[in-house]
């Protein structure tokens, strides 16, 4: 599992078309149905030969896309969530790689000790998910998805290289992760 | 302002990391949080599924804003409860969260309002669903109506796979109430895109796009 942002096929024209044909009609429809939508509307799209089509909606940020988005956001998140202006973004590409427990998703093995991921460094940030402190304050695997490693770079390739260099540093024996996030146009 | 963040996954650690950098945030509390979030917020042991506990936490800390990470508490009406108490919440009402909470609601909405999406039919009866699958042919997509932690969608490349999905969802009731009703829809071809907009009830603003590498292992093998 992983994510990259921005999507390699994002263009101004595509964004305008999706807003006009999918997002804004949904807002009007929900208003007309007496259920106006507030919050983040996350559309899963298929870019078909006939144009963008809606596969599904989520009503919250995606995981792990959110981890990549927050690192690329170059603005105040509260202003972005509540404000009326377009947020600023870093010009860079961002890659997120999820490290999962052995046995995930069927039966993740919990309890393995893991090292402290440490501070944000060299264009990377490590986010916790399924981790917990033991009695002596050590970090242990406590869920299927354990850590998300996010890296920035001037290009998609560089963002992936940056992220994977940090992945190598924080991975514990048995950690499962993809090695190809950001490496191809389409996952 | 005082902010309560609901959730304890990687998504919520990323939100906490960004909220902690906001010059508008003076106090950040997370429920339940995780060891990473604990570095930037005060974590309270209230689970993201405990709507009453979350409301009490927001009231107790006099939260100015509650940012709700996961879909569960949204579908359960947490944002409605907070707004009724005059507390600002980032997240939809339970009625608006049906966009995610009921695939059938979404498909009917798209059909009524001309929003481009795959053709579909809704079923609660397993025999009718199976007959439709045989008549439609494969590939075809079978989805449970309700929330299933991302596991309630089967992209069936053969009729047998689609029939097995119908059996699992409607006959074996593997998804419980979430699978009491299914949507069977046409298979679409093309690259996928995650598209995010921020909405205030009346208007929507484009936020960002991302590409999700859904599978666990390389080359899209595994789950």
Image (cartoon, coloured by chain):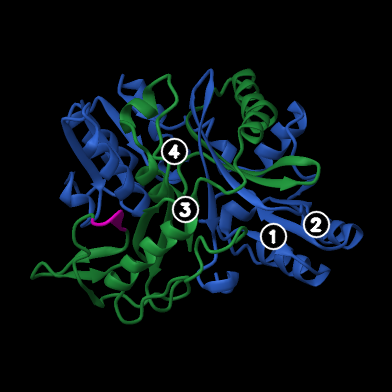
At numbered mark 2, what does the secondary structure look like: helix, strand or loop?
A: helix
Magenta segment: A121-128
Chain letter, disc 1 residue: B
Residue ID for mark 2: B129
Badge 2 crowding class, 10 Å Cα cut-off, few under 14, some 14 to 19, many 20 or more, is: many
What's the residue at 8%, 70% (across, down)?
Answer: A136
Chain identifier of the green chain: A
Residue ID for mark 3: A155
Colour given to chain B in the rendered image = blue
Q: CA distance from mark 4 to mark 1?
A: 26 Å
Q: Position of residue B161 (x, y in %)?
A: 75, 70
Q: Position of residue B205 (x, y in %)?
A: 51, 26
| Marks 4, 2: nearer the viewer | 4
Q: CA distance from mark 1 to mark 2?
A: 9 Å
The answer as to whether the residues below labels 4 and 1 share one chain is yes
Taking the magenta stretch, the answer to whether it contains residue B2 is: no
């Amino acid at each position: 599992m992983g994510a990259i942002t921005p999507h390699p096929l994002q263009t101004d024209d595509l964004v305008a078309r999706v807003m006009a044909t999918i997002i804004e009609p949904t807002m009007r429809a929900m208003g007309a149905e007496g259920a106006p939508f507030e919050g983040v509307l996350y559309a899963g799209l298929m870019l078909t030969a006939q144009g963008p089509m809606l596969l599904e909606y989520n009503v919250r940020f995606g995981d792990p896309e959110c981890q990549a988005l927050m690192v690329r956001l170059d603005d105040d998140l509260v202003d972005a969530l509540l404000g009326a202006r377009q947020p600023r973004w870093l010009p860079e590409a961002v890659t997120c790689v999820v490290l999962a427990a052995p046995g995930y998703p069927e039966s993740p093995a919990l309890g393995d000790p893991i090292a402290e991921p440490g501070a944000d460094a060299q264009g990377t940030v490590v986010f916790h998910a399924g981790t917990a402190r033991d009695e002596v304050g050590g970090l242990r695997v406590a869920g299927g998805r354990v850590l998300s490693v996010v890296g920035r770079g001037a290009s998609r390739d560089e963002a992936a290289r940056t992220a994977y260099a940090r992945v190598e540093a924080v991975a514990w024996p048995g950690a499962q992760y993809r090695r190809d996030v950001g490496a191809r146009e389409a996952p | 302002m005082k902010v309560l963040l609901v959730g304890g996954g990687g998504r919520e650690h990323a939100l906490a990391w960004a909220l902690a950098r906001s010059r508008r945030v003076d106090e950040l509390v997370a429920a339940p949080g995780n060891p990473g979030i604990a570095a930037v917020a005060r974590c309270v042991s209230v689970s993201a599924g405990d709507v009453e506990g979350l409301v009490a936490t927001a009231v107790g800390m006099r939260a100015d804003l509650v940012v709700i990470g996961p879909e569960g508490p949204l579908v359960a009406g947490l944002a409605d409860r907070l707004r009724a108490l005059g507390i600002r919440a980032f997240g939809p009402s339970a009625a608006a969260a049906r966009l995610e909470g009921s695939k059938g609601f979404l498909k009917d909405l798209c059909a009524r309002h001309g929003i481009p999406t795959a053709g579909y039919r809704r079923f609660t009866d397993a025999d009718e669903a199976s007959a439709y699958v045989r008549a439609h042919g494969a590939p075809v997509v079978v989805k449970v109506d309700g929330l299933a932690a991302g596991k309630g969608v089967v992209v069936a490349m053969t009729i047998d796979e689609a029939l097995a999905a119908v059996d699992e969802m409607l006959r074996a009731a593997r998804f419980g109430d979430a699978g009491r009703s299914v949507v069977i829809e046409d298979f679409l071809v093309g690259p996928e895109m995650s598209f995010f907009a921020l909405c205030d009830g009346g208007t929507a603003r484009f936020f960002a796009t991302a590409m999700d590498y859904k599978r666990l292992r390389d080359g899209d093998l595994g789950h």
